[in-house]
Image: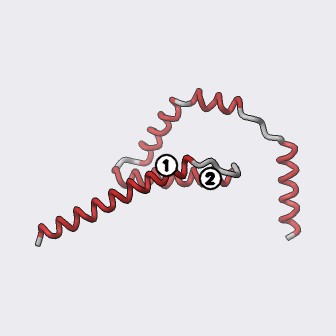
Amino acid sequence: MKNAENTKARLAYNTAKYDIANLLGWFECELAKEPKDMNWATVGTLWRTKEKLIETLSFFSGNETKMIEDSLGELNSDNVDEVFESLRNAPQPDWKAVTRDFRRHAAKNENE
């Protein structure tokens, strides 16, 4: 009887492991996509996803979330020169257009 239970547990374990591997592949596909409309909601979605993944990895690995966040910070600091260079060369927003759009949006919401 115990052997049958071990076999069922092993099957359930392997199924979950296979599903997790496929989900990680799915994440890779989603991350490869470029958003059609880059905005702060898009950024917020990624940050929230990152937060949940850190919590999940903490649960799965037994490591504290702080340790995982620190490790990510170290990895990011290795890339800091590249990030700053891309920001330095990025086109600057048209602040007049941003202000105009913000006022138009605020007026529209005020009238509703």
In the image, residue 2 sits, relative to residue 60, either above or below, namely below
Q: Residue at x 65, y 31 (%)?
A: 86
Left or right: residue 111 versus residue 86 is right
In the image, residue 33 sits, relative to residue 13, either above or below, namely above
Check the picture and name the quadrant holding the C terminus. Answer: bottom right
**Outermost residue, bottom side:** 1
**Residue 105, x across and y down, in percent:** 83, 59
Mark 1 residue element: helix
* Residue receiving disc 2: 44
Mark 2 residue element: helix
Image-quadrant location for residue 12: bottom left
**Residue 14, x across and y down, in percent:** 28, 59
Image-quadrant location for residue 104: bottom right
Disc on res. 85: none
Left or right: residue 5 versus residue 17 is left
The three-letter code of the residue at mark 2 reads Gly
Mark 1 and mark 2 lie on one chain; the one further toward the N terminus is 1
Image-quadrant location for residue 2: bottom left
Q: Residue at x 59, y 29 (%)?
A: 82
Left or right: residue 91 versus residue 55 is right
**Residue 73, x across and y down, in percent:** 50, 37
Q: Residue at x 12, y 67 (%)?
A: 3
Other-residue count near label 1 (Cα within 10 Å), few / some / many at <14 / 14–19 / ≥20 = few
In the image, residue 103 sits, relative to residue 89, either above or below, namely below
Camera-side residue of 7 and 95: 7
Left or right: residue 96 versus residue 14 is right
* Residue receiving disc 1: 28
The three-letter code of the residue at mark 1 reads Glu
Q: Residue at x 57, y 30 (%)?
A: 80
